[in-house]
Amino acid sequence: MENKQLDVSSAKAVLLGALAPGVNGPTWNTLKSAFLMLGSCLAVMLGLAFSSSDSSLILHVGFLVLIAATLFVLLSWFLSQIGLVSVEQQMREMDLIPDDHRN
């Protein structure tokens, strides 16, 4: 049996990850980069809150940082439990490529 690697762009893989069951590698990388950008924005906001010396603003932004960190930890834990799915497997489940094992 011949194993062929499908050439799928990252954008198409992320779109497949949104529509098909499971999470593929490019989708997880996109989520991690989105969380990195969110973390950098929240770090800037926290720095500005500390420079303004407004305790309610510091508390509010700190709570947003806590929510974002908790969400990232829970997503990482969830994906470590279920594992990642290959793009080819997602394409087979959506019948975008033929499956040789079906009757």
Image (cartoon, rainbow, N blue to C red):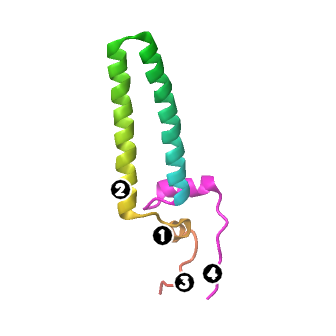
Mark 2: which amino acid? Phe
- Coordinates of residue 78 in the picture (x, y in percent): 35, 56
For the image shown, how many numbered marks are present on the structure? 4
Q: Is residue 2 magenta?
A: yes
Which labelled disc corresponds to residue 100?
3
Mark 3 against mark 4, which lies toward the viewer? 4
- Which tag is nearer the camera, tag 1 or tag 2? 2
Residue occupying the point 40% across, 45% down: 72
Tag 1's secondary structure?
A: helix
The residue lying at 43 percent from left, 61 percent from top is 22
Q: Amino acid at mark 3?
A: Asp
Residue at 46% in and 28% down: 42
Q: Nearer the viewer, residue 87 or 102?
A: 87
Tell me if label 4 and label 2 are in contact, CB under 8 Å: no
Counting residues from the start of the chain, the first of labels 4 and 2 encountered is 4
Camera-side residue: 65 or 103? 65
Q: Tell me the residue that label 4 is attached to.
A: 3
Which disc number belongs to residue 78? 2
